[in-house]
Image (cartoon, rainbow, N blue to C red):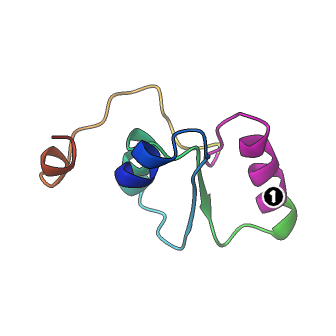
Amino acid sequence: MMYLRAQHASVPVIVVSANEDRAVMRHCIDFGASGYIPNRLDIETMRAAVRAVLDGGRWTPPDLDLSTPTIPAPWCAAFRR
């Protein structure tokens, strides 16, 4: 994701995944994703999430707290160099 963001900074990236681990979601946002959409969501919610990102916003599940700092996973240091 970091390569994609570095090469195409103006293109919003949305992760759609079955993984609902809050740390994974947060790391995706920290590494530059504009949205994280769990694939269990209904199509209308997914559509609204994509629209929000395409309109310049950011979208994550409402219960994901982005206000608190994350504790970096051990593998994160290698990607941030």
Residue toward you, 72 or 76? 76
Q: Residue furthest front?
A: 7
Q: Is residue 12 left or right of residue 79?
A: right
- Report the residue at 46% width, 25% height from top: 67
Q: Position of residue 41 (x, y in %)?
A: 72, 67
Q: Quadrant of residue 16?
A: bottom right
Residue toward you, 9 or 14? 9
Q: Secondary structure at mark 1?
A: helix
Q: Quadrant of residue 53?
A: top right
Which quadrant would the C terminus be assigned to in this image?
Answer: top left
**Residue kind at label 1, given as amino acid type:** Thr
Q: Residue furthest right?
A: 44
In the image, residue 33 sits, relative to residue 56, either above or below, namely: below
- Report the residue at 33% width, 28% height from top: 69
Q: Which residue is mark 1?
A: 45
50 magenta-colored: yes
In the image, residue 18 sits, relative to residue 48, either above or below, namely: below
**Residues in magenta, as a range:** 46-61
Q: Position of residue 62 (x, y in %)?
A: 65, 43
Q: Is residue 28 left or right of residue 78?
A: right
Which quadrant would the N terminus be assigned to in this image?
Answer: bottom left
Residue toward you, 71 or 31? 31
Q: Is residue 60 left or right of residue 71?
A: right
Number of labels in the image equals 1
- Report the residue at 57% width, 52% height from top: 13
Q: Position of residue 50 (x, y in %)?
A: 75, 53
Q: Label 1: few (<14), some or many (≥20) within 10 Å?
A: few
Q: Position of residue 65 (x, y in %)?
A: 50, 36
- Report the residue at 30% width, 36% height from top: 70
